């Protein structure tokens, strides 16, 4: 079943993420997620990695083990959820979105997609 982790994000709140910030099932729609964030930001960057089902399940378990993210903690919660899993073995948790983006952009096998208005 597809899942999206949107810590401290309105997408999760408005699409059934509840207290977990995890959206699953039909609402875990990546194009819809990108479109949603494109409406409030000038640009959206999407980092794509080849991951196994087991790695994806571990990331969601990690996300579900974290408390609800207060505003301004999206990078911290995301980096914590992916830290040490699959291609994210050497990710260091950070509170800064630009630092997380930098770490992700230097990992082997990354595909970066940028969407702009």
Image (cartoon, rainbow, N blue to C red):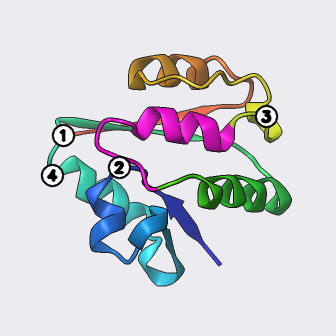
Query: Which mark sits nearer the N-terminus, 2 or 3?
Result: 2
Could you tell me which secondary element the residue under label 2 belongs to? loop
Q: Is residue 75 left or right of residue 109?
A: left
Q: CA distance from mark 1 to mark 4?
A: 6 Å
What residue lies at 41% left-to-right and 21% top-to-bottom?
96
| Quarter in which the N terminus is drawn | bottom right
| Mark 3 surroundings: few (<14), some (14-19) or many (≥20) residues within 10 A | some
Q: Which residue bears the numbered disc 1?
A: 41
Does residue 3 show up magenta in the picture?
no
Which residue is painted at 31% across and 36% down in the image?
72
Gap in Å between the C-alphas at discs 2 and 4? 17 Å
Q: Residue at x 53, y 81 (%)?
A: 25
**In the shown orientation, is residue 67 left or right of residue 116?**
right
Residue identifier under label 4: 39
Helix or strand or loop: what does disc 1 sit on? loop
Closer to the eye: label 1 or 3: 3
CA–CA distance between discs 2 and 3?
22 Å
Residue to which mark 3 is pinned: 84
> Where residue 75 is drawn, which disc sits there?
none
Label 2 vs label 4, nearer the camera: 2
Nearer to us of marks 1 and 2 is 2
Q: CA distance from mark 1 to mark 3?
A: 29 Å
- Depicted 5 relative to depicted 22: above or below: above
Q: Main secondary structure of the magenta part?
A: helix
Q: Which residues are magenta?
A: 68-82
* Tag 3 secondary structure: loop
Q: Position of residue 57 (x, y in %)?
A: 75, 62
4 up-or-down from 111: above or below: below
The numbered mark at residue 8 is 2
């Amino acid at each position: 079943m597809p899942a999206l982790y949107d810590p401290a994000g309105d997408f999760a709140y408005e699409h059934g993420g509840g207290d977990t910030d995890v959206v699953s099932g039909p609402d875990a729609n990546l194009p819809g997620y990108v479109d949603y964030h494109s409406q409030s930001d000038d640009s959206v960057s999407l980092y794509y990695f080849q991951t196994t089902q087991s790695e994806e399940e571990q990331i969601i378990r990690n996300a579900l083990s974290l408390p609800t993210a207060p505003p301004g903690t999206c990078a911290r919660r995301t980096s914590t959820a992916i830290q040490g899993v699959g291609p994210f073995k050497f990710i260091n948790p950070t509170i800064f979105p630009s630092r997380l983006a930098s770490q992700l952009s230097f990992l082997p096998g990354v595909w970066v997609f940028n969407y702009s208005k």
